[in-house]
Image (spheres, rainbow, N blue to C red):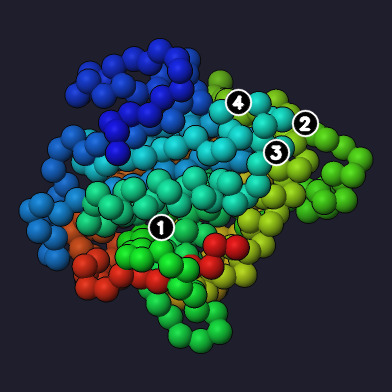
Amino acid sequence: MTDAVHDPTTSSADASGGVALPTEAEPRLAFRIPRQSAAPAGPGRSDDASVGVLVLHGFTGAVYGVRDWALSLSPRYSISAPALPGHRTTWQDLGRTTWRDWYDHAADELAELQAEHDRVVVAGLSMGGALALRLAQDFGRETEGPGAARATGSAGRRPVDGVVVVNPALSLHRRDARAAKLVSRFLTSTAGIGNDVARPGMSEHAYPRTPVAGVVQLNELMAVTTRDLGRIQAPVLVLRSRQDHIVSDASHQRIMRRCSGPVETVVLPRSYHMTTLDHEAGVVNARTGRFVDAVAAGLCPITGLPLADPAASPGTGGDLT
């Protein structure tokens, strides 16, 4: 992968290594950052092992919403924070995309990280959290039974080694959002849903309007991801705001009940939906860093037990529909 991927705008150089990074004035910039220093050594990790982290933003939002979260990991790990299709242009463009467009773009980024690194963690905020969970379902270890992932011809696809989700979107508060398919017959867009932040003066640079067709796609993503939660065997860290006005508690409760692997939930009492920009952003960064450090050391971040050797056996491809 390249050191940085940019929109055709000017960016500032990072003082730590000359890698061009997005600034607050360029909120929609996608970026990739190679590892700048060695990750912690530990049991199950050789000196030349490496970890990549894929960080996914939320619905109608921008990379800026997860920028500081991603950069908190960049000194030790390689980071990819892509702008998902329809999310760095206009809300009208978003209305013309499908959840499979978002998923395919994220899956391509994950495959690139896996090709270059021994282990990969997938992280996501809100819709990005749903996509991270979906990737863990499809890039998962082979299981038996009717819920098992089926092979798709993606030879050598490896399981993800861990998942970190912040206020993952599997269920929304708003009833009109649940009825988006019906509403889309009468309305093209509604008021923007972004910027649910308790911290004064903060903005995620979300679209001012929400395309109803996009909400229909989000609902489909949430439905298929919820349906297949039992396929997730990787450890999952859930960071959950107590005062989230966008995503309901049913989201993290479903994850805790249905995932096959270990799940840890951390409650954040002072932040709203956009926790990565809110009062407890530092907690999100620290807990994510500890999680990835454990993965780099070859340990499950939740149980402390050794993770499976990534070279032992490739995972099976999942059902991408």
Q: Amino acid under label 4? A: Thr
Circles 4 and 1, Cβ within 8 Å, touching? The answer is: no
Q: First in sequence, mark 2 or 1: give its number.
A: 1
Q: Quadrant of the C terminus?
A: bottom right
Q: Which amino acid does label 2 sit on?
A: Ala
Distance between the alpha carbons at the discs numbered 4 and 1:
28 Å
Identify the image quadrant of residue 159. bottom left
Q: Which of marks 2 and 3 is in front?
A: 3
Quadrant the N terminus occupies: top left
User: Visible in this render: residue 279?
Assistant: no
> Which numbered marker is on residue 163?
1
Mark 4 Cα shell of 10 Å, populated few (<14), some (14-19), many (≥20)? few
Specify whether 12 is left or right of 309.
Answer: right
- Asked whether the beta carbons under mark 3 and mark 1 sit within 8 Å of each other, the answer is no
Q: Residue at x 56, y 21 (%)?
A: 201
Residue under pointer 2: 191
Point out the frontmost of discs 4 and 1. Answer: 4
